[in-house]
Amino acid sequence: MPTPLEEYLFDLHGYLHLEGAVGSAHLAELNALLDTYLDLEPDQWRGWVYRHPGRGQTHHLHNLFEIGEPFERLIDHPSWLAHLNRFVGGDDGLFIDESFADIRSAGAATRIHSGAHKRRIRTQFRYHDGQFRCGQINILLALDDIGPGDGPTMVIPGSHKSNLLHPVFAEGAESLDEVPAAVELPLKAGDAACFVDCMAHGSARRTNPGQRRVLIIRYGPHWGNDRYGFQPSPELIARLTPARRKIVQPLPPKVPPS
Ligand SMILES: O=C(O)CCC(=O)C(=O)O
């Protein structure tokens, strides 16, 4: 379970920094497997893994768990599972509605987006009667060290409860560099940021040479749907442990007997 201090900080800021969430041996497995997918072209599939077409030089590789067992271990990873159960809340469990790797090089940034002023249901922050009921909690796992100049994630703490539009939205800011109230969230390899999606966030522009590698896994309530309509492969469903299968496919398709 999150500690009382973690719950307080998550409620106050909208995010937590989970230090050392994934160990170095596991990280090495994830990085090595990911390397074997970097030759995918935009809009290309390999098996059930798909590279998104629309992110320029940035690799967005979707359906992480199809890549192999080291990725499957992330589904119910003990460093964050209890946090997600607590922050998504409810008794029926979780669902992952998107999982992807974001691998980028110099020049790339993620523009500022989200913010509670939108009152989006899917990504909402909610706390009522002692229970969190958040619509989407993200785990952003650093696969390498991400410090100043590496394009760290940036957040506007507290904006998961904001009522007003941040003025920079109107100006169409491309990254969060120099956005008032935005702070960088530097991560060491193996650290994870755990944040509610309605907090305004994005990333600084990467100015250093080399790559920034993160995995992003979005969790919500068990009744959710995949963001893009991706479906798990029958092979993945067959080989997952029951606990993992329940998070990837909480409601198996119900069809009449053939
Ligand atoms: O890439 C980042 O650092 C920010 C991730 C992000 O914007 C998101 O998860 O929606």
Image: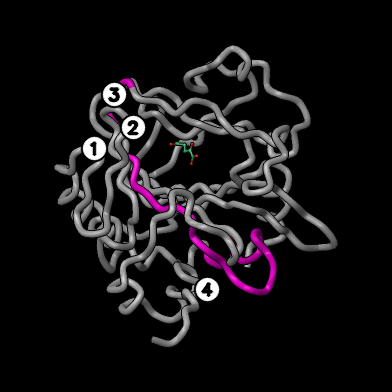
Q: CA distance from mark 2 to mark 3?
A: 17 Å
Residue 220, labelled with which disc?
none
Q: How many marks?
A: 4
**Identity, as a three-letter code, of the amino acid under mark 2:** Gly
Q: Nearer the viewer, residue 126 or 147?
A: 126
Q: Which of label 3 and label 1 is nearer to you?
A: 1
Q: CA distance from mark 3 to mark 1?
A: 19 Å
The residue furthest bottom is 257
The residue lying at 51 percent from left, 30 percent from top is 184
Q: Nearer the N terminus, badge 4 or badge 2?
A: 2
CB-based contact (under 8 Å), mark 2 and mark 3:
no
Kind of element beneath mark 1:
loop
Instruction: Report crowding for label 3: few under 14, some 14 to 19, many 20 or more residues within 10 A (C-alpha).
Output: some
Residue 195 in the image: state x and y as whole percent. 58, 47
Residue 207 figure quarter:
top left
- Say if mark 3 contacts mark 4, CB within 8 Å: no
132 up-or-down from 204: above or below? below
Question: Which quarter of the rendered picture does the C terminus lie within?
Answer: bottom left
Tell me the number on the disc at residue 54.
Answer: 2
Q: Earlier in the sequence, mark 3 or mark 1?
A: 1
Q: Earlier in the sequence, mark 2 or mark 1?
A: 1
Whole-Å distance between the Cαs marked 4 and 1? 31 Å
